[in-house]
Image: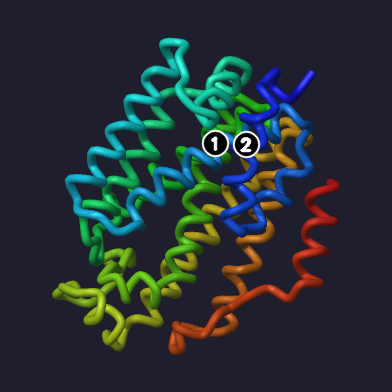
């Protein structure tokens, strides 16, 4: 029996999307049993595809149409229909792990925000909604694939998603600014808030703004860890590993400081291996 009972060619096609992304996600999901691992591959492939729609060249109308097509694909899943390798594997994952339609739609809505809006210093409420859509919604899908559909698992997704996304925002400040974007919250800047990403980077209070966002992220990491204690230990292994890895990235950013934002803050390979052994096998 193949994982999820899926066609082997469909599984290979989905896994190829994951591998082609060149991230550590493929290795990180190795801690999961085969059915759950391939469900996660399909969730990741969906996220990768809709993210690429936004990031690749094209006008806003084309991107909106492509995202609307994915809304149609997701709606069809819940009518029991699938049209390609990714949706065929997703359909099996939806049925087996009771993945929720609203979470798929939330991810698409978050991508549409990036595709149609040049975000500069959003208010805290808008930033929180963005983090919920592009990260916590993925977490809500993931915890079910991991093996925990409890309320506590959704709390883990709520906090860990925000922690991871805030860390990404701090890591990518310079890269986002090159695209005209700045996700740092306007309430943390002196009045008036910056009107452009370039202005945000030139503000003298930028290091303090970044430090406050880092504090928000730390709080979410702590709240996620507390919620994990109420969840199935085995199901939370991938979440613990992701949380520990990103928390280390956040600390590396803090050690680097907020003056030279174009300098990478990466983890040494030995540290990544240590984290994988400690939290992947725990």
**Residue sitting at x 78%, y 42%:** 31
The x, y position of residue 25, in whole percent, is 65, 51
Q: Nearer the viewer, residue 191 or 10?
A: 10
Residue 8 sits in quarter: top right
Q: Are marks 1 and 2 in contact (CB under 8 Å)?
A: yes
Q: Which mark is residue 43?
A: 1
Q: Is residue 104 left or right of residue 249?
A: left
The x, y position of residue 247, in whole percent, is 62, 62
**Residue lying at the far top of the rendered structure:** 79
Question: Considering the numbered disc 1 on the image, is that residue within a helix, a strand or a loop?
Answer: helix
Question: Considering the numbered disc 2 on the image, is that residue within a helix, a strand or a loop?
Answer: helix
**Residue lying at the far front of the rendered structure:** 9
Q: Which mark is residue 40?
A: 2
**Residue sitting at x 23%, y 66%:** 120
Q: Is residue 253 left or right of residue 182?
A: right
Determine whether 95 is above or below 103 in the image: above
Residue 186 sits in quarter: bottom left
Q: Nearer the viewer, residue 49 or 267?
A: 49
**Residue sitting at x 24%, y 61%:** 119
The x, y position of residue 153, in whole percent, is 60, 32
Q: Residues within 10 Å of mark 1 (few under 14, many from 20)?
A: many
**Residue sitting at x 27%, y 87%:** 202
């Amino acid at each position: 029996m193949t994982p999820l009972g899926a066609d082997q060619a469909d599984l290979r096609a989905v896994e190829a999307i994951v591998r082609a992304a060149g991230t550590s996600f493929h290795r990180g999901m190795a801690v999961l049993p085969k059915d759950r691992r391939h469900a996660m591959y399909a969730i990741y492939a969906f996220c990768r595809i809709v993210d690429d729609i936004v990031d690749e060249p094209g006008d806003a109308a084309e991107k909106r149409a492509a995202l609307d097509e994915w809304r149609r694909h997701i709606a069809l899943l819940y009518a029991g229909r699938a049209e390609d390798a990714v949706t065929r594997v997703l359909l099996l994952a939806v049925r087996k792990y009771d993945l929720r339609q609203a979470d798929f739609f939330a991810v698409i809505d978050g991508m549409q925000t990036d595709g149609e809006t040049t975000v500069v210093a959003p208010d805290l409420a808008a930033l929180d909604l963005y983090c919920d859509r592009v990260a916590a919604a993925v977490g809500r899908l993931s915890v079910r694939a991991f093996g925990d559909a409890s309320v506590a698992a959704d709390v883990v997704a709520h906090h860990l998603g925000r922690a991871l996304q805030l860390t990404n925002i701090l890591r990518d400040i310079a890269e986002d600014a090159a695209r005209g974007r700045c996700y740092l919250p306007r309430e943390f800047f002196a009045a008036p808030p910056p009107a452009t990403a370039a202005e945000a980077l030139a503000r003298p209070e930028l290091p303090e703004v970044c430090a406050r966002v880092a504090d928000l992220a730390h709080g979410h990491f702590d709240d996620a860890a507390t919620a994990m204690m109420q969840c199935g230990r085995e199901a939370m292994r991938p979440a613990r590993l992701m949380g520990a890895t990103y928390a280390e990235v956040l600390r590396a950013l803090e050690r680097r400081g907020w003056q030279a934002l174009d300098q990478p803050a990466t983890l040494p390979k030995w540290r990544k291996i240590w984290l994988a052994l400690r939290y992947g096998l725990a």
